[in-house]
Amino acid sequence: MRVMATADDAIMAKLSACLYGYYDDPFLSHFAQNARSSTHEGRQASSSLGQISAAPCRHSAGRSQDASGAQQQQPLIRRGTHARVCCIDRAISSFLKLAAVSHNQIVILGSGKDTSYLRAKAGIIHHHSADDSSSFAHLTQNTHWYEVDFSPLITSKCKLLSSCPSSHFTIVSVLDDTPSFSIATNDISTKKATANSSSHKFNYHLVSHDLNHSTKHLLSTLNKQFEFQFDSPTLFVMECVQMYLPNSTTTEIFTAISTLCREPIIAIYDPILMNDQFGKVMESNLSRAGLINRDMSLIQTRTLEQQFQKLKCTGFDQLLGCNMMEAYESIVTPQQRIRANQCEMLDEIEEWILIMRHYCFIVAGKSSASLSLPDSSIT
């Protein structure tokens, strides 16, 4: 399935950025080892989006199966990937600090081969205070972390976790169409557990679920089997997930989260086509690649304002957001920008600005929640 293949594109783009020194993620080389090249159409679609990992969604431009393939990506891809990672990291680290309570939750929708949990447990996810890595990792002790994606991707992630040489985490529970599996990475052992068995000792959960299906059912399953609590502060992360879902489906996702969860926050990274020529080219190439159609959110929600309006209509009345060029200048820290500049020169400044203006980063919450968003920025 073409959408699932974008998970490989994403991790190869991130690996490329890490190999060039943009940021640190010691887990990427392991989780990228089985990544495969996209179809020609997929690479063409990624290229049309400016060949930037801030490019299509869960992915980025064409790459190959190993580190040499990651090395071959263009500076625009790496710079955009870095910006994307910095923004998502900022949302996660800010949430963990704000939600320093006995129980909080992070749900990665369309997680692919995401390594944020491992980086958080290792204390190397972005945090902009003087805290050392061990004290930051301590913030995750009360966090239940859920990764949700298609069954084949969850199965693949499960296998990669079971062979991961690092053990910054302890127990993983997996919900698939078959009985659940729990992985104890300290001794790299795997054991079966029934879908109805207690999972209170787990805090990292891999869940098989097609996001085209009912979000209410998903949340109910998490509640019944994996201690998901509707009244606990919860951060939902969606990185270029909306663009591959029908607009009606994303509306249902937001409505279900807003209705069922008392303290929800959503962090969204997505392209915005707008109505200019560049956006029309993006749309045309993605359509030809068979990745989108007219019903998709990417087509129906073309601007930042339309993104805000959809969130407001589904119950989120606290909204912070901007295009990625603005995010790069405000959310990405000066130290991170300096590090990026030291990694390699970026000559295509006009193209960079154009591409970044066609992506957005949004954080949404509810004013009725006790965990409020900051007034003007993500702290």
Image (cartoon, grey):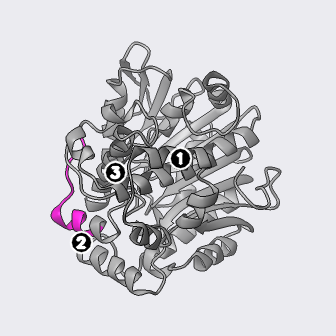
User: Dot 3 lies on which element?
Assistant: helix
Is residue 204 highlighted in magenta?
A: no
Real-space Cα separation, disc 1 to disc 2, in angstroms: 36 Å
Q: Viewer-proximal residue, 241 or 215?
A: 241
**Dot label at residue 14:** none
Residue under circle 3?
Answer: 7
Give the amino acid type for the residue marked by disc 1 in the picture: Ile
Nearer to us: label 1 or label 3: 1
Residue under circle 1?
Answer: 338
Residue found at the far left of this picture: 40
Quadrant location of residue 62?
bottom left
Q: What residue is rendered at 65% in x and 77% in y?
A: 309
Q: Is residue 40 above or below residue 79?
A: below
Give the amino acid type for the residue marked by disc 2 in the picture: Ala
Residue 16 place in picture, x, y as percent: 33, 45
Residue 15 place in picture, x, y as percent: 34, 42
Q: Which of the two labelled residues, at mark 2 and mark 3, occupies the earlier sequence position?
A: 3
CB within 8 Å, label 1 to label 3:
no
Real-space Cα separation, disc 2 to disc 3, in angstroms: 16 Å
User: Dot 1 lies on which element?
Assistant: helix
Residue 73 place in picture, x, y as percent: 27, 52
